[in-house]
Amino acid sequence: MKTIEKLRANEILYVEELTVNQIIQSLYDRKSVRVFEEKQLSESDKKLIIDAAIQAPTAGNQVLYTILDIDDNKIKHELSIICDNQPFIEKAPFVLVFLADCRKWYDAYSLAGIDAREPGVGDILLACEDAVIAAQNAVIAAESLGIGSCYIGDILENKEKAVRLLNLDRYTLPITMLIFGYPTEQQSNRPKPKRFNSRYIVQKNRYSPMNENQIKDMFQEVHDEDGFDYNEYMKAFCARKYMSEFALEMNRSVFEYFKNFMKL
């Protein structure tokens, strides 16, 4: 057993003593990896990561997703372009796209002679939950093998191009993409960004908006470097992320996907 001293320093502020196992340790250690060694994953490790993903919790044991294993270099290249022009995507040795998939059960009902309703918004959201839970299983499985990973949320952008590129059905939605590979030494040694403390994240029983002091304290604790200016940080982050062109495109694109599930 390992002690809490092995966990990230900012967490030690809030937990005096705790014993952790290897799985807990890997959850604290894992960070996004965007630069990989020029080393391929073995087919057995790829299969293990995918099979571990499929062991994830799933609503009603329906497994409401399809995993696209992208090994076509042309498709990887196009994905790197439509996902906000990020070249490291096509350099990744192993790329998986997780589709929330309402088509397979809809067709299964039809094959049984059932005149089932068309999938709705609740159905695709439930499928998204299934797919993302499976994706996280894949991430943790890879971490246990010394294989790094990075979520690519930009797969939600450019709906029309993604549909053509991946031959997506109207009752599917690419909820996330994962890239995998062996991290370079620089990536392995790169510090993991601090997370917000649980006292800002967990509430008892009923939701309550945070007050001004709580919000500012939450950010100050993870940005404890000298000279941190809350207002300047938020302005820059908002411009770079929340109000960015890719965020606006993501919202447009997701709305187009959801139109297929919004029939009354």
Image: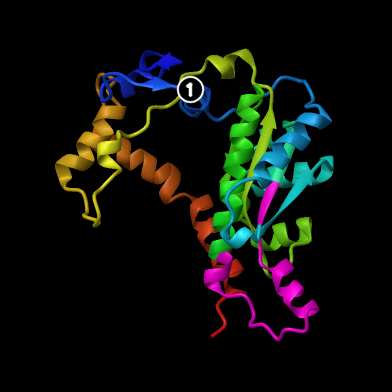
Image quadrant assignment for residue 70 = top right
Q: Is residue 173 left or right of residue 241?
A: right
Say whether residue 42 is magenta: no
Q: Label 1: how many residues lie within 10 Å, few (<14), some (14-19) or many (20+)?
A: few
For the residue pair 47 and 39, the one nearer the viewer reads as 47
Q: Which residue is found at the position 76% from the left and 30% from the top?
A: 45
Identify residue for label 1: 21
State the SS at label 1.
Answer: loop
For the point 82% across and 41% down, the residue is 71
Position of 132 with respect to 39 (left or right) is left
Which quadrant of the figure contains the C terminus? Answer: bottom right
Colouring scheme, one of rainbow, by chain, secondary structure, one colour: rainbow
Residue at left 30%, top 43%? 201
Tell me if residue 243 comes above or below residue 183 in the rendering.
Answer: below
Measured along the vertical axis of the image, is residue 48 above or below residue 228?
Answer: below
Percent of width and height locating residue 262: 55, 77
Position of 16 compared to 117: left or right? left
Above or below 116: residue 161: above
Where residue 235 sits, quadrant-wise, is top left
Q: Amino acid at mark 1?
A: Asn
Residue 118 drawn in magenta: yes
- Give how far across and how far down residue 182 sits, in percent: 68, 22
Residue 6 picture location, percent across and down: 42, 14
177 or 30: nearer the viewer: 30
Q: Residue at x 58, y 15 (%)?
A: 186
Judge by depth and name the residue closer to the eye, 185 or 57: 57
Query: Where 213 sits versus 145, above or below?
Result: below
Q: Which residues are magenta?
A: 97-124
